[in-house]
Image (tube, rainbow, N blue to C red):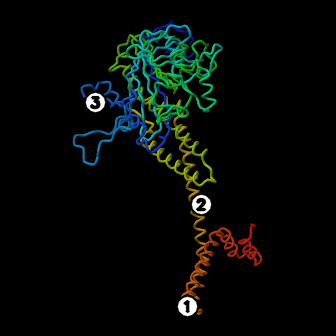
Amino acid sequence: MAPEGDDSVGTEQTARLFHCSLLWPLQLEPLATDEIGGRHWEVLAARQDHPWRRIDDEFTADPAQFRERHYREFVSFLPYVQRFLYGEGRSRQQRPGDPAGDSPVYVFRRKDVTGLRLTLRPGAAPVELRIVHLDLYFFHDLDVVVLNLEFAAEDLPLATARDILFRFGRAYPSGWDEQGLGMHNAHLAEWIGADGEVLAASDSERRTKFLEYVCEHRSPCITGHWAWLLQPLVLAHSDAAGELRYRLIEYHRMPAMAYLAVDDPRALGRDDWVCIGLATVLHPDEALPANDPQVREFMARYCQDRYWLDSAEGPNTRFICTGSFLAVVGDARDPYFVDTERGVLAQFRHQHFVVFLVAHLHRASLLVFSEILVDAVNDLDIRDDSSVRRFKRRIRANFETFLRFTHRYWFHELSERPQLQGMFRLCANHLRNDELYDEVRDEIREMSLYLDSDSQRRQSNMVIRLTVITIFGLIATVTTGYFGMNIIPFIEGAPLSRVFHGVAATLVFVGLIMFAVAKSKRLSDFLEVLADERVGLFGKLAAFARVFGGGR
């Protein structure tokens, strides 16, 4: 391993094999009406006017197509993680009434996009990349969808690979230069079809479009090629028609994974490793900020060197994880490192992908839970009974979903394999998932306590009113019982007189009960004063007068 203080820079190298996976978590808006029916993925599956198609995982397909890399992925994780990813176990002797549980993960894939052409800078030659996978991941009970885009290339200069990692994978431009071109993003990104035609292209140079959208909607607009790719999903605040709507959860930079097979990783200097590990946040044309803690503590903070021996025999594979970026760098001459079935490349595309996906699913879900709580509080108007009832329903529903999230998706131990478990903890720690979970749990607990205390307050007020009515009703009961001794012979009067007396008595008693309900709070205060032996006669009379007056 290069020593901590070695700032030497290795010779310019070529990535003989370059793979990159972008994972873009998005928040799904609730379906607009109950008439639509189903959940988000069911609505998407029911439509045929788009290229996304539901796919079964490899475990439900033809056994002849089940590869060893799929088997290795499956056995790498603990049983409860297997059930989360792949569903319950299946048996030919399935008991009636106990159907096999399916995975809560629903995957859609489109195959019409086969290539990606990137013009990284104005006037630069385009870089051609092939699309390996283009998927949408939905999750049961969670208003989260994750876009997964995997692309690859061969014999790519390492500097170009770094430029791609920095410039591509941005949902919108962060600004514009003097020429009106988007900053920090690829100058032009084009989706290429099977016949070589351009299906959609980026439009980051349309400065007016982004300014007007933010001004009007107070929400960011995404570039055209990403909007086209996600259709029929549309931005929540856009004017486009569509029942499947989404909004951004975090910063416009998408979490990314990169696999780099270089000629000689031992020739890379410390600055090279920093530039690779921080490729998504360090501008390729700028000098390293030597005093930045991320740079100074890079090796200890982000590198996992379990398989880095720094010897001619190897292995010389370094894993780098900053939370939002995961890189695997190794020797292209090592057959095991580039093996697509049993080697590191297969692990990168399967086990490491799952680790990265789960960590970012945790973070995205927790941020969505927090967003729902904030939105519920913002909509609360305690003077409006319908708003209060709507607030209670949303908080209770969010609490129930959070409980299901905790038991179905949340776990700290992913695998018994030290490499995978260490990578998961490193990624989760940099994402601050545990701290975020505690914050959201405390927020939901505070909301639940508020609802419980409000319910108890309402019940207490009701008990007070019932107690006051009972006390004064007891007086009326005793009084009517006394008159029931036939001191006044109402039964001997004329029928019309008896009806009149009955109606009059009913109206009097109803009026007394309504008066007692209306004055129950003041009557309760009067009863407390009446029961207090320390209060004199005049104090008790004053308390009785306040029942009919407006004073305190």
**The disc labelled 3 sits on which kind of residue?**
Ala
Say which residue appears at 53% left-offset and 11% top-offset. 269
| Image x and y of residue 301, in percent | 54, 24
Residue under label 3, please give it.
61
Say which residue appears at 57% left-offset and 60% top-offset. 456
Residue that extends furthest to the front in the rendered view of this protein: 496
Distance, label 3 to label 1, CA atoms, is 91 Å
Distance, label 3 to label 2, CA atoms, is 57 Å
**Is residue 161 visible to the viewer in this orientation of the structure?**
yes
**The disc labelled 2 sits on which kind of residue?**
Arg
Residue that extends furthest to the left in the rendered view of this protein: 93
Residue under label 2, please give it.
457
Residue under label 1, please give it.
494
**The disc labelled 1 sits on which kind of residue?**
Ala
Question: Nearest the camera: 505 or 288?
Answer: 505
Res 197 quadrant in image: top left
**Is residue 308 visible to the viewer in this orientation of the structure?**
no
